Each structure stands twice: as structure tokens, then as C-alpha cells.
Image: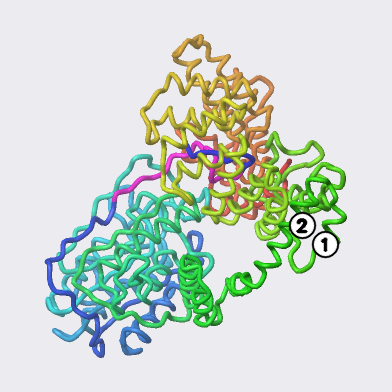
Amino acid sequence: MRPRFQGWTGVGRRLVPALALLFGLLGAGLVHAAEPEIFADNAESVAVVIGNRSYKQTVPVDFAHNDADAIRDYLIQRLGYRDTNVFVLKDATLNEFNQVFGTERNPQSGRLWRSVREGRSNVFVYYSGHGVPDLATRQPFLLPEDGNPNQGESGYLLETLYRNLDLVKRKIGPERQLVVMVDACFTGETGRKGESLLAVSAPGFAPARPKTGGGIVRLVATSGATPANWDEANRLGLMTSRFLMGVSGLADAKDGTGDGDGQVAWPELKRYLRQEVEAAARRASGREQIPEVDDAPIMLKAALPIPAVAKGVAAIRDEAAWRRAEALGTREGFEAYIGSCGETCTYREQAMERLFAGRRRDAAAIDQENWARLGPEKKYQAYLESCREVCAYRDLAVAYPGGSDPSGDPRVKRCDALAAGTDDPDRPPEVAGVKLGRIEAAAAIEACRTASAAHPKLRRLSYQLGRAYDRADRYKEAFAAYSQAAKDGSISAMNNLATLYENGQGVKRQQGEALRLYRQAGEGGNVVALANAARMLEYGNGIPKNEAEAVALYKRAAEGGDVPSISKLVPHYATGAYGFPRDLRKGFDLFRQAADRGDPVAMATMATLIDNGFGRYFPGVSASDMVLRALKRGELGAASVSATDTAAQKLRPETIRTVQRAVKEADYYSGALDGRFNPVFVRALDQYAKANEVE
């Protein structure tokens, strides 16, 4: 269960009772230690690049064609492969897999084996598309365009690929390299929220590890426990994006993972990929993605980035250059930044402001003297008339004519309108508040930065500025803003600050400090913080486990109105633990209470209970009605309903068909009324929920 931010109702920070398929896969191969060799002299090297985007029997992999094009460009433009020696397959069928790699019975029949030259060819094999586990044989396989994800025989086994490539490696010899890069996962999930490639779930299932020889160097997007993510900004697979950025020189950067010698050593690339992919995946989906990269004696020359990642690399280098200039804090440093940044020059205005700051110091000193003389006497108009080039206290003078409430300041009103927390006790009663997921980050940051600078003692403005930065995934700035608000006593900020500490976002992960802040905010009346503290104690998340204390905190949170905490108490009515009466009816009544308060998780849970023989505890309620009520809670409702497909207790096909019919009549679903959570239906649920969301 992940921590919840104050005022956040998005799926990423709420508990959804789904069971993920956990697969251990593709262990790192062993490579004998050797001196690094430049991966060059590729005039007779051969590559196979596969990008499977479209599938006949399942959902597409949106950026797979982009991945293939980008890798092809890198091989030809940067590594010197001949165009004719790079075999690009898009939406490859099983027959095409067999033709290029060979079959299990005839491994040397493949085009790749026939094309390589002994002692003269390096080999690069790349795949972007769906990977799927075969539940019957326990073997993972790559899914061809015409393959069925539920029929392993229709796919190309990963073990067959590695066995056939081992023969290719033997042919090219020990002095040449064979690199295999797989930007896919083998969890059975699509990477889209709530979607699965498989018709059945298999909690705890782990496929067998494919066997390989020691000479193949593998880069695999994920260990198999979680889906591989996409880089939406660059429209590539996340692993592919970071690989291309790393080999362009970012992996060699001195302020990152490298030594800045102009060459990307394989250990530098490995460290860079693990660090950057893991961090980007957490930001994008809130889940782990740790790539597996074999050791290898390979050196790559840092080169200009290919067009597919050029803007992304430029943005990262621009950010690093600005941080260096800020660290120096000198005129020379800011001039160097402006002089060196090219088309991407994000911080040009800030650098120019710093350069001109010196000439404003004298004017600022005069302004300070005027305010010190006129402010205490409340001669605000006189101060405004004294202003010249610098008028630092203008907002205070305008907002406090005679000491009026700063809430009347238009800047404060705009910040409130754009970023006030819906359940922040500091929020003025006339302000509606905004869900975190609906904050327009850029506008809110600008408004709240201005407002909080004008009224630094108004703690809700710092909290709201933190929410705006949080929405933009700018966690370091969010941490600073939340810290200021928490220091000033904002209990909502304390909860969100604790969550950053717990996740290690914008600050080094400190579980003890997270628990302390959760407790402090909870004692101040924040029921979400109480529930977060209870969760940490329940699961022992970086702290000693204490389930009895967790239950006590859940009970306090539930009594304070925290809906998710109500559901946490239900199991104790079934077991009679921790002083609860052994009365299942009382426990199930809590689900009804939570559902009545609008919790979609409780609604979906009630539906599954009704469909699994507990309908007598919920008289007058049908499972399909509860599902449709949950969907009207928006994104979280759709995820809660979809998660019932992988829960221990599932919805009956009749219930699913009733919901399919309702969604179809609303023109959001065009598939069959098959009583299954097929991929088309899952996407329709999400669209239907967002369109029919009830605030």
C-alpha cells in the first residue's frame, strides 16, 4: 500500500487490491574479465532490429516502431553499421522470427547466422514489443504480430533465441561482441493501467530462467517483476530512450556516473541505465523498473545524440549547466551558461536576472530603508510613492492598507483558486479547492510563487506551492515548499513532506523521519497522516513492524472520517483480533459505510463479496450496481473495478456482462459481451469512468 498525499485522489497513491504477477527473469550472464575494447570496426557487423507495435490479438505497443527506427539510426549513424546489414522488422510474424533467427530444430537456418562473418562481425539484436510468460511451460516468449498471448506455441521462446544466438556467437568468435537488447517485460501486463495480456491470472507464478552461454551481453528493460515503462516525452521505450541518451555521452558525464573522458565504458553505461531507468519509472508510474545489464569488456565512443533523443539530451545538459552556474554564483558562471547554451536555454532569463542583480543592489538598499522607516508607521501610500526601480514591499503595502486580511490580495486569491487543497484545514471556507491530479502545474507554480513571496508567513501558500511543484514532479522544489509550510505548522504539508521522505523523492529516503512527521500531522488532526503512519507500522516499511499499534491508528483515522481506514478494520471482525468482536456482519457493515462515503475500493470489494456468496450481508444491493457506482468515482473507481480481475475473489461473468452492456449503451465499449476483462473493455472502463465522474 502506497502513502497518500493530502488532497490527492489519484490511483498512484491509493491502495487498489490487485495481485501483480511477479516473475524473476533473465539473470545476469557471466563475462570473463578483459580489457575494454572499442565497439567499432563494424563494416561487416550485422544487426537485427524488431519493433512490434501492432498485434492482431491484443493491444498495441505504442512506441515500438519509434524504438526500432531510433536504434537503427544509432547503429548506422554512430556505430558505423552498413545500412544493408541492419535487418529491420516491424510487426514481425512468427514466420519472420524463424526466418531471421532460425527455429528450435534448425538453429542455423536463420538469416542472421548466415550473414555474419567469422572474426569480422559484431552483432546487435534489438527487440521492442510484448513479452509474455507461458503459464504451462514456465517459459517466457516474445510475442509475434500474429501470436496469441495465451498460447505459448504461437510465440518465439526467449530460450530458443538465446540458444540460437549462442551459435552465432561461436561463429563470430571470442574477439567479437554479441549484444542483445530487449525493451519488453514478461509480467503478462501491457504497461497500461489495469490491462493484462493474459486471460487468467497467476499470483506468485515465476517462469523459468532462459539458459544462455557466457558470451552474450544482455540489456533487459526490467527484471520481470514489473512492467517496462515508456518515455512519453521522447515517445520511446524508457530503456531505449535512456540507452540512447547514455551512449551519447550522458553516461560518461563527470557530474553523473562517468569520468568525463569522452568514452562510455560499459560499467558507466550500466550504472547510468540502472540509475536513470529506476528514477524515471518511479516518476512515471510509481513502480520499480530495474534493468538487468550484463557486465562486458566494451567501450563506446561518446557521440552526438541521434535525432530521436536530441531534445531530451539537450534539456538534461542544459539543466546540468545551469546547476553548475548556480553553484558558482558568479558573473562569470552565469555568462558562461548563457554563452554555451544553444537552442535549449531554459534558464536564460534567470541567468540574465542574476547578471543584472548587482546594479539593483543599491536601489534595493534604499528601498529597504524606506520600508523600515514607513512600514511600522503604516504609511503604506508614502512607501509606494517612494518606490523607484526596486519596490520589494509593494505587495505588502497594497494588501495591508490599514492592516487588512492578505486573503484579499489578488495574488493570494489566484493561488487559492489554482492549488488550494480540498481537505486542507487552512483553506478559506469560500475556496473550493483543487484535486492534485487536476492542478495546472505551470500556472499554479507561477501564481503561488508570487503569492508566497509576497506573504511568506501565510503557510497555506507555501503548502499550495508545494502541491503545484508536486504536480509537476519537481520534487526538490516541492520538498522545500512543504518544509517551509510544515515549519510554520501546516499539518497537511507535514503529511506530504513525510511522503517525500518515505519515497525518497526530492530528498534522501528516511523512513524514520517519515513516520515521525506522519505521527505529528496525525496528532494535529490529519486523518490521512494517521492512516499513513498505520500503514508503515502494519507492513514494517523501513521501521519495526507493530500491527497492534497500526490497528489502533487505523481505528482513530476511521473515527475521524478517513474512508480507506474503515476497510482496514474489517478483517479483525472476522478473526476477533485486537479486541474486536468476532462478528462478520459488523465488519461487512464497514464496507457499506465506506461505500456510502464514496470509497470506490469499498464498492468494488462489496461487489466481489456479493458475487462470492456473501450477498445476504448486503440486502437490496446488486454487484453490478456497486460496480457502476464505483466507476462514477473516476480514475480510481475504474482501477478498483479492473483490479477485481486479479483479486482472490472475482466478479461473476454475469455481473461483468451487465456492466459491459451498460458501458456499451453509453457508447464507450464496442467489444463483445463476453463477461471478461478483455483489454478493450478495460480501456472502455477508464474512459467511461472519467466521463461520468461524480465529484
Tell me which segment is drawn in magenta.
Answer: 10-24
- Determine if the magenta segment contains residue 266: no
Say whether residue 1 is visible. Answer: yes
Q: Residue 458's quadrant in the figure? A: top right
Task: Name above or below for residue 404 compared with residue 395.
Answer: above
- Residue drawn at (48%, 21%) of the image: 551
Please tell me whether residue 13 belongs to the stretch shown in magenta.
Answer: yes
Give the quadrant of residue 68: bottom left
Vertical comparison of 365 with 573: above or below: below
| Callout 2: SS | helix
Q: Which of marks 1 and 2 is nearer the N terminus?
A: 2
Disc 2 marks a residue whose amino acid type is Asn
Q: Which residue is under mark 2?
A: 370
- Give the prevailing secondary structure in the magenta stretch: loop
Q: Residue visible at 55% across and 26% down?
A: 567
Question: Crowding at label 1, few (<14), some or many (≥20) Cα neighbours within 10 Å?
Answer: some
- Disc 1/disc 2 C-alpha distance (Å): 7 Å
| 346, 680: nearer the viewer | 346
Which residue is under mark 1?
386
Instruction: Mark 1 and mark 2 in contact? Answer it, CB < 8 Å.
Output: yes
